[in-house]
Image: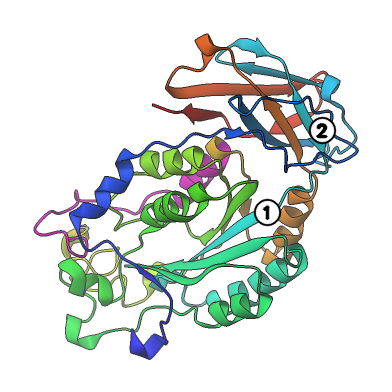
Amino acid sequence: MAARSRVALLLRWLAPALFLLLAGPALPSQQASPSQEPSSSQETPTFSSDVKVVNVLATVRDKHGQIVNNLTKDDFKLEQDGHPQVIHYFAKDTDLPLTLGLLVDTSMSQRRLIDQERTASYGFLNDLMRVDKDKAFVIHFDFEIELLQDLTTSHQKLEAALEKLDTPQFNQASGGGGGSGGGGHRGGGGTTLYDAIFLASDELMRKQEGRKALILLTDGVDNASKVSLDRAIESAQKANTLVYSILYADPDAYGHPSFGGPGMGRHGGMGGGGMGRYPGGGGGGYPQQQSHPDGKKVLQRISKETGGRFFEVSKKQPINEIYTQIEEELRNQYNLGYTPDKADATPGYHRITLTTTNKDYIVQTREGYYAGE
């Protein structure tokens, strides 16, 4: 901890009691408030204080992939569970505050990419965030999860947090990266991607209002989380949070001694391909895996189901260009709101279908939401 100058809150899974967080459902809707003044582009009726409005953020593109930002409320069609809904609230180029969470993979597979990620991430946050209006936080994850900077509007604090990004120090005392349990993770293995999404959504985003988005910088491989991919996605959906996934992979990462070699598994040196025990797991283990998951498919699914977008860093599409696209998208969103009938507002998950009258347009939005249980 001291070696990394960790002064922020450490988000670690050290006790089963943390699983109590899973029990509390959150409403994806919010009450209409007189303080939320509509801009001139909004068409908003007056709601009583007890009316719940389901908000849907959407980005629209034409068949060439260009953002379409001149649509009106009448250009959209919205359904919930197959039932048509009346769009009562509509805003174009919404000016609502934006809450951003940057989740950076600092596992050994990312060791050669962190410098580029750090520089590009600060430029993105600096350009996108409006002074005293938008806020952001920074989390890194490897075998553990750490909040490097809590929600802040300060660009200086965010830059300082990004400077702390680093991969775990290789610990020779842990047996050269082999073995199982917490020591094996510290030896170079272990990536808690799903846990990081869950904690960022449930602990931070769930409490925020307005527009919310997580930015994931990772190769998409998870081999140490306690929660499943399904539960991670559900937590983001319950928090009304879009997830933008940036696949940034080092093709030679798993050839590093910390990941392979004689007698070592592919994941962090776990013997025989085993996943080992999670920190504080108290004897529980993970199923054997002979090869790491398809990180690309994992990230594509996360973004699709939460209404975000998937990107892959390449020579043709460097990380700076991807951040520019995300920034443009976040500045050109439609904000739609509707009030489902009581019969359609039953507790549980409800599927949302949003389309436009122009069949050539592609609408990017979340696939559904969770009503209170």
Image coordinates of residue 230 in percent, x first then y, are: 38, 38
**Front residue of this view, candidates 16 and 290:** 16
Q: Is residue 157 above or below residue 329?
A: below
User: Relative to residue 19, is residue 101 depicted above or below?
Assistant: below
Q: Which residue is mark 2?
A: 63
Residue 154 locus on image (x, y percent)? 66, 74
Tag 2, which secondary structure? loop
Residue 317 visible within the image: no
In the figure, is residue 118 to the left or right of 350? right
Q: Which mark is residue 98?
A: 1
Residue interval drawn in magenta: 277-304
Q: Position of residue 363 (x, y in %)?
A: 72, 31
Look at the picture and state if 284 lies above or below 28: below
Q: Residues within 10 Å of mark 2 (few under 14, many from 20)?
A: few
**What's under tag 1, amino acid-wise?**
Leu
Q: Residues within 10 Å of mark 1 (few under 14, many from 20)?
A: many
The answer to whether residue 279 is left or right of residue 245 is: left
- The Cα–Cα distance between marks 1 and 2, rounded to whole angstroms, is 28 Å
Q: Is residue 265 left or right of residue 63?
A: left
Viewer-nearest residue: 240 or 104: 240
Quadrant into which the C terminus falls = top left
- Asked if residue 338 shows in the view, the reply is yes
